Amino acid sequence: MFYTIYEFLKMSETILIIGACGQIGTELTQKLRSVYGNNSIIASDIREGNEDMMHSGPFEIIDATDRETIIKVIEKYKITQVYLMAAMLSATAEKYPQKAWELNMNSLLIVLDLAKEKLIKQVYWPSSIAAFGPTSPKVNTPQQTVMEPTTVYGISKIAGEHWCNYYHQKFGVDVRSIRYPGIISWKTKPGGGTTDYAVDIYFKAIEEGKYECFLEEDTRLPMMYMEDAVNATIQIMQADEKEVKTRTSYNLAAMSFTPKEIASEIKKHIPNFEISYKSDFRQAIANSWPQVIDDSQARKDWNWQHKFDLESMTNEMLINIKKQQEGVLPSM
Ligand code: VAH
């Protein structure tokens, strides 16, 4: 059987996902296993994952700040790429700032150093729109602009972006990064984010027919369906090195909406659905973030294209959550 160069190169990759049991990590693991083969993807986290995660390929218990264990696993499986998905998100990070800084920063510096020492070839590290702040332009937020984040999570993300760029410029480390917007999926519950309302609202619409939103009705935020986010992550890692011109992190977008707009989209399927509003500390976090992101650089450099908008995502979410409720699909 003849393999194309591309297929051969893919076959020679062994990938370690640190933080595989998180909201994005869970679905990224599934997708990478379907692309590279189950045994080429080593999933890891501080605790075991769901049934599918544990039975579809190798799994290791790794604390993302434990350098020795990470090295042991890299040597055991001859890892070539690391996707570092472990992080403490915006809302939780405000409650535990020191822990958030240590987890989000120390894990990144460990992995960047291992790439500098040539133990691994390539690194993926997620940034976030949280790296922007209240002084960044709110609409069509450019790839390069004023970035003065006012959250612990955002500070860790902007610092991480500069560390990635430093290790690339100084040591030639091939680290790639995307500034994720809020990510929405039905397969995995998010943990401790400010955009989590956009996941919870779909489940509560089906389970209870009503939802109390912790953000005000006109709070516009950039969002993306999980399938698009996972595809973009793999796409940037498979892009030719010279196409990846930005080594801090790429803006990425698909849609932007408010709680009022997502509620009216849900009402097209569940006419009696009721939303109410009771904003909490997460309102100040959301107010500091952009509303609409300009991701033209990613579309130009490595041909990023999103697939889902609010209408198609809402269809997907409601159809699949209903299947979970009926036991046709596994619940979270
Ligand atoms: C959070 N879901 O809410 C994450 C994300 C843009 C938001 O980084 O913290």
Image (spheres, helix red, strand yellow):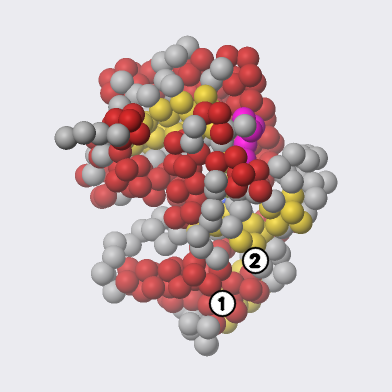
Q: Quadrant of residue 126?
A: top right
| Residue topped by disc 2 | 257
Q: Is residue 84 left or right of residue 11?
A: right
* Residue at the image position 69 percent from the left and 52 percent from the top: 293
**Crowding at label 1, few (<14), some or many (≥20) Cα neighbours within 10 Å?**
some
Q: Nearer the viewer, residue 264 or 285?
A: 264
Q: Is residue 275 left or right of residue 236?
A: right
| Residue topped by disc 1 | 265
Q: Quadrant of residue 25?
A: top left
Is residue 232 within the magenta segment? no
Res 215 seen here:
no
Q: How many marks?
A: 2
* Residue at the image position 56 percent from the left and 33 percent from the top: 243
* SS for dot 2: strand
Q: Is residue 142 above or below residue 197?
A: above
Residue 234, horizontal then vertical, whole percent:
44, 41
Residue 144, horizontal then vertical, whole percent:
74, 39
Residue 232, horizontal then vertical, whole percent:
49, 46
Q: Nearer the viewer, residue 280 or 25?
A: 25
Identified by mark 2, the residue type is Phe
Q: Is residue 60 above or below residue 261?
A: above
Highlighted magenta segment, given as a residue range? 246-250
* Residue at the image position 51 percent from the left and 63 percent from the top: 308
Asked whether the beta carbons under mark 2 and mark 1 sit within 8 Å of each other, the answer is yes
Q: Nearer the viewer, residue 192 or 13?
A: 13
Identified by mark 1, the residue type is Glu
